[in-house]
Image: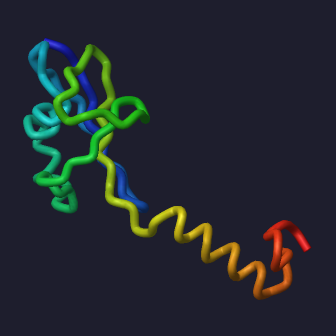
Amino acid sequence: MIKVEIVFALPDTATSLSIEVAEGTTAEQAVLQSGIAEKCPEIDLTNLALGVWNRTVKNHQVLKEGDRIEIYRPLIADPKAARRQRAEKAKEEGRANKVTGGRA
């Protein structure tokens, strides 16, 4: 048996569970075994995005002793689109050069 931690965070709260699983357990199996989905109904078990110690992993990643499995939420906005909107706004407000996009 190995000890791992399962973590899920919302903007205002975080849930962390320490569990023991058999060696050879995958990240997805550990999340299902932990019962965190009952405590946090916001978790979509059909589209799990997982990470171990802040690095995304495939759900079939085999865990090691002391791993911290993080359950990621889907992005609210596309980062590239948000950056593009900020740049356009800066051009409109005169804070950026309309041709090069650099500082005015």
Quadrant where the C terminus is found in the figure:
bottom right
Quadrant where the N terminus is found in the figure:
top left
Residue at the spot 41% in from the left edge and 61% down from the top edge: 12
Locate residue 31, reporting x and y percent.
16, 38
Residue at the farthest right position: 104
- 100 and 50: which one is in front? 100
Residue at the farthest front position: 99
Residue at the spot 25% in from the left edge and 34% down from the top edge: 58
Left/right of residue 72 with respect to residue 12 in the rendered view:
left
Locate residue 99, reporting x and y percent.
82, 75
In the depicted structure, whether residue 30 falls above or below residue 101: above
In the depicted structure, whether residue 12 falls above or below residue 8: below
Residue 94 occupies quadrant: bottom right
Residue at the spot 9% in from the left edge and 16% down from the top edge: 22
Locate residue 53, reporting x and y percent.
40, 30
Label tally = 0
- 38 and 48: which one is in front? 48
Locate residue 49, reporting x and y percent.
27, 46
- The colour scheme used here is rainbow
- 3 and 25: which one is in front? 25
Residue at the spot 20% in from the left edge and 36% down from the top edge: 59
- 47 and 16: which one is in front? 47
Residue 16 occupies quadrant: top left
Residue 40 occupies quadrant: bottom left
Left/right of residue 54 with respect to residue 57 in the rendered view:
right
